[in-house]
Structure formats: structure tokens, C-alpha cells
Amino acid sequence: MKFRCRMIDLTAMREFTNIVTIISRISKQCILRLTTDEISFNIGYDSVPVLWAELSQSHFFTEYVMSGVSEEQNEIYLECESAMLARSLGSLRLHSKSVKIKLTNKLQPCLTFEIELSSSTVESRQCVHDVPVRVVPRKEWTVYKVPDIPEFDVSIDMPQLKYLRNIVERMRNMSSHLTLTADKTGMFILRVETDSANVSTHFQGLQVWSCSQVEDNFAISATIDVKKFLTFLSWDIVHPNSVRCNILENKIVNLFLELSGYLKVRYFLPAIAT
């Protein structure tokens, strides 16, 4: 079992750092799944999925070598502290020339980051970070498999995340709960309710990909935690090509983000009974 890769493209390093930083804000721990084609980040609690992010290795890395536990199961699962990953990559913001990431054994398994920093002198400078990891045994892999995606009552494109974030930040000061509503006409509504007022923002004419709605006066809704939704909106930093909101009436909201075919993110928000 081995893993090593290298990044030299400044844009790729910045994007990778941004992705890991966002993930570190969602959870202290994450599962890193390594395959020959992808790197995936998995966050979940008690087998309930929270986030699944897939990164195409060919976009980010100029060198990529991965050999899994066996030829039949050519994968590696690592459990690590996401905040330590983010801090280790922080040096990439300091005029870095390249970074090598390797699976090493330094008294315990580690992901070792060897970051070559730009220098005004002939000699290059190097910064090394070791992030302890737990190699997840095969008997636990089923817990961290790709989440099952249910059939949703409505699937609709979302407005630009930066606009939504400005709105939701204000709504957060009014309530801890936020209701998302969509219908077959392309209407998307954000709504908070308090004892003194009901506040809503309406977007019209959005692309609807599927909808089980039959009656025109019926819309599909789910109430979620406003802070968790706001955490997802921080993905606006990667400038996604498209973001889709999938709602299963009063049960779950699934937010799907895609960027140029090399980044796919699914974020799961359970509905709150009101």
C-alpha cells in the first residue's frame, strides 16, 4: 500500500487548499478515500452522511501514484483530523512552488506534506508537515461508502451562492431554522419565521430538473438548520459552475455542487420537525 502525489500548478494548489479549508469548518474529523482516479472526502455521523466531495486527481496533480490494499480492492481509506490538514496546506498561500503529499510511517501512519517555498536565493526552502492518520481497515469500508441518493420530490438550480450567503447571514440573526421551498415553475424561496414576523426571499425562473408536484398551488418544502446551510454557502469561494438543491418533502435537503467536471460535492441536511 502506497500513496504519493505532487502539485505544481498555483491555481490547483489554491483550489485544493480552499476545498480542505471548507471541509475543516464542517467537521473535526474526515475520511479520505484514495483511488487511482479520485480523492474523496467523506464526513458522516453514525452512518448518516453529511458531506461527500470527489476531486479528480488528474486536475490537481502532475504526479500521482496510488497502490491500494490489494489488486481487487485498489483503494485506501484514511481517517484524519481535517483541521490539521488545512493548517498543513496553509503554507501553500506563501508563494509556494510545489507540494508533495506522501503516505509515510513515522512511528505511526502519516500524510507528509513537503512544500517547496519560493526563495530569492539559489537555495530553495522547504516546509514539512506530518499529519497523523488512521488507516481504516477493510471491514469498516462499508461505513464510508458513497452515500445512497434517494429520489427527491424536487430538484432545482440555486441562485449564485454569494447572493444567498448575504441573505442567509441576515436571516440567521432572526432564527436558527430556515425553510427552503421550491415548485415546478422554478420558484425558490428562503423563509424564516419568528413570533413577530415572517421574512422570505423569492427567486423565480430557475431551472427545474425534476418535480413530483401535481397541484399548482402545492410547493415542496423542508426546514433545516440555518447555520449548517450557511456553512455550505461558503463553497462560493470555489466559484462552482452549478449548484442544485434537491428536496425530499420534510425529510432531507441535498445540495449538489459541481465545478468543471473535477469537483463534485454533495451536502446532506436533515429536515427539522416544526
Image (tube, rainbow, N blue to C red):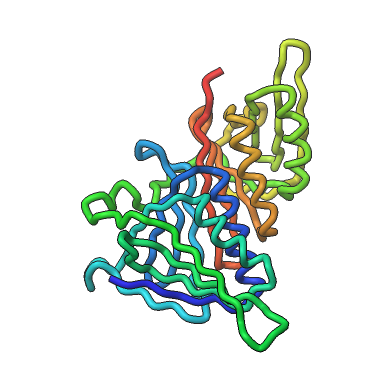
- Regarding residue 171, the answer to whether it shows in the image is yes
Q: Furthest residue to the bottom?
A: 122
Looking at the rendering, in which quadrant would you find the C terminus?
top right
Of 31 and 113, which appears nearest the observer?
A: 113
The x, y position of residue 59, in whole percent, is 55, 74
Residue occupying the point 39% across, 78% down: 65
* Percent x, y of residue 202: 77, 35
Whether residue 211 is visible = no
Please tell me whether residue 234 is drawn above or below residue 100 in the rendered image.
Answer: above
Q: Give coordinates of residue 129: x percent, y percent.
A: 49, 64
Q: Is 265 left or right of 43, judged from the image as shown?
A: right
Please tell me which residue lies in front, 15 or 239: 15
Q: Is residue 241 left or right of residue 33?
A: right
Q: Is residue 43 above or below residue 259?
A: above
Task: Please name the residue shown 45% across and 62% down the image.
Answer: 130
Q: Using the image as rendered, state which of residue 60 and residue 113 is in the foreground.
A: 113
Q: In the rendered view, would you say 176 is above or below 40? A: above
Residue 138 percent coordinates (x, y): 23, 56
Q: Tell me the quarter of the image containing the N terminus.
A: bottom left
Residue at image coords 77%, 11%: 196
Please identify the quarter of the rendering in which residue 238 is found.
bottom right
Residue drawn at the location 54% of the way across and 60% of the way down: 88
